[in-house]
Image (spheres, grey):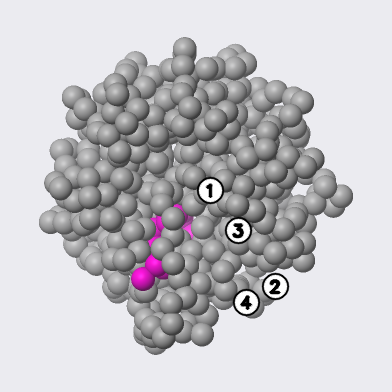
């Protein structure tokens, strides 16, 4: 990905540090709103689930990052769950509350084509056409009998366009190859061949390459200054990376970043249902290095440059992935979610890619990564979303992990928490952490909000400081039940302050949670409404 759009790309060393989430450094409590939040964005109607997906980059060329908000269950012009993506322009004077209604919201709006498409379930940003302005990719994996569709909208100086796909065309439309492939459940952009143009990368996690049912595959459409129109992956598949085994769902999640410093982005792909070494659904993540020219790869016979496998059955490693420079050495490091781990307490792993990197297989059952964050209670869902961003401006990117069903306290269950772990400079590599605790917690405001189901870090306020954008897609707003809410917190943030008292697990009195449905893709769960779609 071009460096100017790294804000959300939305992503190995083996130095040890294990973190069980038991206490926090800085705590930000969203119940104190409006004090902690500079801006809130509220979904436009009941059960829109605004904030299910979030991306941020400068889409109109004014130097401020803009926020793309996915509301995959919104009903544009009565099209049930066709989905809407809203673009909220950044700037130094944008504060208060924004309501995403047809009468009050004046910014760009992208509307899904057909009922039940779930347009906006996944989002990614990057510069596909090389004009220096970020472009926006939007997934709708339930469209066309779940073949799936990905739409690419080009950013432009001055204003980002509004498009109603029921009557208008996106600049580039990519349709899935076969029914049930679910192309677009995950999307990414990144310059994999080093030509200065970002490729469009599409996860089709239920594709069946070479007859391997639901092995999954990834399609890569090369960046171009002139390419537009419609691509049918059945006849023009682009560069294809095929998942290695039936049922893995390779392509569940995607991230790009340059792990080896060669100027080409590398591709990290999650396969959350992989069953390595006999561990059913332990999950896996594969790293495929960028190269020129890009070539087809069948992982059934060609090994990835790196494979990371889950520690235990039902961990779902790779349900979310990210890349970012956690140790300040100018190489991207790996962040992996495993939201099924420990009875869905969940976990997030940070693996440092040092000079020389790693090849072969990293087995998390026997090899300890740089950091592990684990949830406190069953079904906290920690690792359901992961990401990176330099929140404290120390030159090292920080690790972020969402636990959208976590409990800030015994009396506040299912509120959701965003956890942050401070990155470290490359010096002092054997003592990377000051303490075995998270350095930041952002607590959700209300029960059931699913706070931190999606998030991004970017300079929305145009002050050269990082801002934190957090989705709570099940939050109630003035506009309806589960309309969704997005919080913008202005940075920078203080990490590693004076320790606070230990937070203990919530006592088990009566069941308050049920397991989060699997699978997950991109970095958020697919959120349905009105029982419109019941089969994933």
Distance from label 4 to label 2 (Cα)? 8 Å
Q: 86 left or right of 342?
A: right
What is the x, y in percent for residue 110?
Answer: 71, 37
Give above or below for 401 relative to 288.
below
Of badges 4 and 2, nearer the viewer stands 4
The image quadrant that residue 154 belongs to is: top right
- Which residue position is annotated with label 4? 31
Marks 4 and 2 close (CB-CB < 8 Å): no
Over which residues does the magenta segment extend? Answer: 378-394
Residue that extends furthest to the right in the rendered view of this protein:
103
Which of pointers 1 and 2 lies earlier in the amino acid sequence?
A: 2
Question: Badge 2 is on which residue?
Answer: 34
What number is the disc on residue 534?
1
Which residue lies at the image location 80% right of the left edge and 51% below the top edge?
Answer: 101
Q: Residues within 10 Å of mark 4 (few under 14, many from 20)?
A: few
Foreground: disc 1 or disc 2 = 1
The crowding category of the residue bearing disc 1, from other C-alpha atoms within 10 Å (few below 14, some 14 to 19, many at least 20), is few
Mark 3 — residue?
Answer: 473
Q: Determine if residue 269 is in view.
A: no
Question: Which x, y percent locates residue 303?
Answer: 19, 30
- Mark 3–mark 1 CB contact (< 8 Å): no
């Amino acid at each position: 990905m071009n460096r100017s759009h790294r804000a959300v790309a939305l992503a190995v060393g083996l130095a040890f540090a294990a973190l069980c989430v038991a206490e926090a450094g800085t705590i930000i409590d969203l119940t104190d709103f409006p004090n902690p939040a500079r801006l809130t964005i509220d979904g436009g109607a009941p059960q829109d689930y605004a904030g299910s997906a979030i991306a941020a980059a400068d889409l109109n060329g004014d130097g401020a990052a803009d926020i793309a908000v996915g509301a995959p269950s919104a009903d544009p012009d009565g099209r049930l769950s066709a989905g809407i993506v809203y673009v909220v322009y950044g700037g130094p004077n944008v504060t208060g509350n924004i309501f995403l209604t047809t009468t009050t919201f004046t910014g760009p709006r992208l509307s899904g084509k057909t009922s039940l498409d779930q347009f906006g379930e996944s989002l990614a940003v990057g510069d596909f056409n090389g004009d220096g302005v970020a472009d926006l990719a939007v997934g709708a994996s339930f469209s066309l009998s779940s073949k799936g569709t990905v739409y690419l909208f080009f950013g432009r100086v001055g204003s980002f366009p509004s498009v109603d796909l029921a009557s208008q065309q996106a600049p580039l439309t990519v349709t899935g190859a076969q029914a049930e492939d679910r192309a677009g459940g995950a999307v990414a952009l990144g310059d994999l061949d080093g030509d200065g143009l970002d490729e469009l990368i599409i996860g089709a996690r239920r594709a069946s390459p070479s007859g391997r049912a639901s092995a999954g595959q990834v399609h890569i459409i090369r960046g171009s200054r002139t390419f537009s129109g419609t691509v049918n992956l059945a006849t023009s598949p682009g560069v294809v990376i095929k998942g290695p085994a039936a049922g893995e769902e390779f392509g569940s999640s995607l991230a790009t970043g340059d792990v080896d410093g060669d100027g080409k982005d590398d591709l990290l792909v999650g396969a959350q249902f992989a069953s390595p070494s006999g561990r059913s659904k332990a999950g896996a993540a594969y790293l495929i290095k960028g190269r020129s020219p890009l070539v087809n790869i069948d992982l059934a016979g060609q090994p990835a440059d790196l494979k990371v496998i889950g520690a235990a059955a039902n961990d779902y490693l790779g349900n979310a992935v990210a890349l970012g420079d956690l140790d300040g050495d100018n190489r991207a490091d790996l962040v992996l979610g495993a939201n099924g781990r420990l009875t869905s307490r969940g976990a997030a792993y940070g693996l440092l890619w040092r000079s020389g990197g790693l090849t072969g297989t990293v087995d998390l059952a026997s090899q300890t990564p740089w950091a592990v964050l684990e949830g406190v209670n069953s079904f906290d869902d920690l690792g359901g979303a992961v990401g990176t961003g330099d929140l404290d401006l120390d030159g090292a990117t920080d690790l972020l992990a969402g636990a959208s069903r976590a409990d800030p306290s015994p009396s506040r269950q299912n509120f959701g928490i965003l956890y942050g772990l401070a990155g470290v400079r490359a010096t002092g590599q054997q003592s990377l952490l000051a303490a075995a605790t998270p350095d930041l917690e952002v607590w959700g405001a209300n029960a059931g909000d699913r706070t931190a189901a999606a998030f991004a870090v970017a300079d929305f306020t145009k002050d050269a400081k990082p801002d934190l954008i957090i989705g709570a897609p099940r939050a109630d707003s003035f506009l309806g039940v589960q309309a969704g809410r997005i919080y913008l917190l202005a940075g920078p943030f203080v990490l590693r302050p004076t320790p606070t008292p230990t937070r203990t697990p919530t006592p088990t009195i009566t069941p308050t949670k049920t397991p989060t449905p699997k699978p997950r893709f991109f970095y958020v769960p697919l959120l349905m409404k009105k029982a419109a779609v019941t089969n994933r």
